[in-house]
Amino acid sequence: MTKKPLSEQVVVVTGASSGLGRAVARRAGARGAKVVVAARNGAALDMAVEEIRASGGEALAVPGDLANPDDVAILVERAVLTFGRIDTVICSNMVTVYSEVEQLRDDELQRVFDVNFFARVRLFNAALPQLKESRGTWVDVNSALAYRGIPLQAAYCSTKAAMRTFLESARTELEKHETGVDICCVLPGAINTPQFDRGRQRIGYQPQPVPPIYEPEPFADAVLHCAEHPIRELPLGWGAQKLLWGQKLSPRAGDLMLRRMGWKGQHTGQPKPIGSPDNLYETLPGDPGAHGRFDDESRESTLWTSLRLRRWLVGGTAVAAAGAAVARELVRTR
């Protein structure tokens, strides 16, 4: 179902203080949406609101920790009181811990689940009456790692898998009851965000995204595409697509590759003290912005995702290729 244009929507973006959520909020505001930004970092949210207003959009900042049920209720209430409704919720709030399973503490695992899973579930239930009324869309910024657990990220991968399957159940139920609410699960690959400087780590090195790395903006555009043209599941970037295909074809081959590359591929080799400040329980001061430290290694576009979003082009390319193959065969057999 095609939704109303983004310029006519009220969009709630969580995790909007930095990274992909920040880029999504900027892009939504620039396209005319009324944007409600939520995160723990109030100062960064104020900057996000300024950016949206500078582009001609309307915005509201609602700081809070969505692991707190009261803050979830406040977010939905303030969005509706200010703008009258909610058309799309884009959920991008997350935390992580880089740690092997044996060193992962119970309280750390619980906190990652509280933020990445339970907070989203509570927001889903709180926003659902509004989404039913607007026949709106839930866009979950999930991860390709929802389908493939990797070393050092057991907590993060577990929450992403849990959220993906929760939404599968919810999607089927909503479709059965013909609510008109769509659920999109976006599966990004590696993104250059500040999270790699802010996440808790127990590896002693500076974490990094596993290449290929992309800037947040092309992924933000794909996320906003789902607000107008919902897609059930959307891998973002060629790296994500390769991971999904590889896991389907041969999980054992993935195990072998990760044993060789799964550790060194997730850090820069630059030492970083264990116990460095992180944002697991409390936000860090300052405005981190949308980009991390990996601009020089990051791609500013993703051809694969662009083709995926333009099915007519993919279909046309396939037809043209098939036609060329038939023509070659006819010439060969003459």
Image (tube, rainbow, N blue to C red):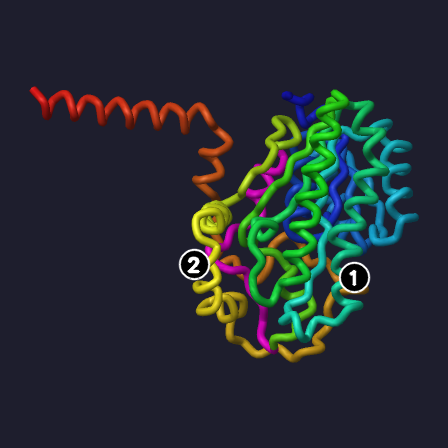
Real-space CA distance between mark 2 and mark 1, rounded to the nearest whole angstrom: 32 Å
Q: Earlier in the sequence, mark 2 or mark 1?
A: 1
> Does the magenta-highlighted stretch encompass residue 325?
no
Query: What x and y, as percent, mark residue 202?
Result: 65, 75
Q: Residue at x 70, y 46 (%)?
A: 163
Q: Residue at x 77, y 55 (%)?
A: 115
Quadrant of the image occupied by residue 60: top right
* Residue 300 seen in this snapshot: no
> Does the magenta-highlighted stretch encompass residue 218?
yes
- Quadrant placement of the N terminus: top right
Give the extent of the magenta segment.
Answer: 204-224
Q: Amino acid at mark 1?
A: Arg
- The image's mark for residue 253 is 2
Q: Amino acid at mark 2?
A: Ala
* Residue 74 seen in this snapshot: yes
Decide which of 188, 103 is in the foreground and name it: 103
